[in-house]
Amino acid sequence: MENPSNFIVNTISRKGSLHKDTNEDFLLSVRHQNLLLCAVFDGCSTGKDSHFASALFGKILRNVFFSTDLNLNLELDDLLKKLTQSFINQIIEIKKQLQLPIDELLATCIICVLNTQTKEAKILTIGDGFVCLNGQNEIINQNNTPNYLAYHLENIEKNNSFDSWYNTETQYFQLAETEKLTISTDGILTFKSELNSDENFIIEPISYLTSDDFLLGNKSMLSRKINILKNKYALSNADDVSIIRIDFI
């Protein structure tokens, strides 16, 4: 958890009950001056070594953030686009160097850039996921067949078509003044009762994790809340879940 004077970032990545061995998600939260970069990645279970794809994407994006000459005076739209283009260019290069087939690069991405001074945020989604914008839930659902970035890498490289892909194959959200912002893999939608019940929940897991302020100042807030959901309410996530929650205080 980061704890500057005016905002708190809480993160959690937790394996789902349907996955016996590995958590196929990955998350990233890094900061440079007044720019906060957050991202969550969800590896495709039907891909090969899907935990590798999500972790690889996260580490590439982190490297891009710290190695690219970012003009922090750029508009956030332009910063996000520049980061994404450098991110994709590096994926293409590593794909060639390691001779990675498409099925080893299947992961969804949600990338958020936030100006911690102006509180403006821009969010790019590539594939399924979940975003909560000042209490407004947005579910990105492509019927469990996400339009993975990996499907477009060859075309982007051969036809220099990044702009076309960026404008047509992604989904975009923004906040002019952030109060509460959560990005998450779609595992947040999979909390289910461990008991034989009709699942009329006593507590609503999504709002509890994204909007409720209980334990807000605690560095383990999200971890403790997921434990409470399981131990008190018998609710657990079936799919892996990675959550980044930002609260301005």
Image (cartoon, rainbow, N blue to C red):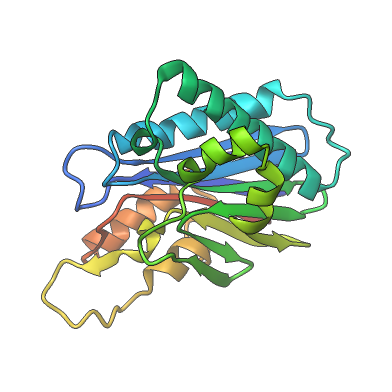
Q: Position of residue 232 (x, y in %)?
A: 24, 65
Residue at 32 percent of width and 50 percent of height: 240
Q: Position of residue 245 (x, y in %)?
A: 54, 53
Does 170 sit left or right of 94 as displayed? right
Q: Is residue 1 visible?
A: no
Does 93 sit left or right of 14 as displayed? right
Q: Nearer the viewer, residue 118 or 202?
A: 118
Q: Position of residue 39 (x, y in %)?
A: 55, 43
Q: Residue furthest right?
A: 73
Quadrant position of residue 41: top left
Q: Nearer the viewer, residue 170 or 28?
A: 170
Q: Is residue 115 above or below residue 188?
A: above
Residue at 50 percent of width and 62 percent of height: 210
The C terminus lies in quadrant: bottom right
Q: Residue furthest left?
A: 196
Q: Nearer the viewer, residue 38 or 228?
A: 38
Q: Is residue 247 visible?
A: yes
Residue at 39 percent of width and 60 percent of height: 188
The N terminus lies in quadrant: top right
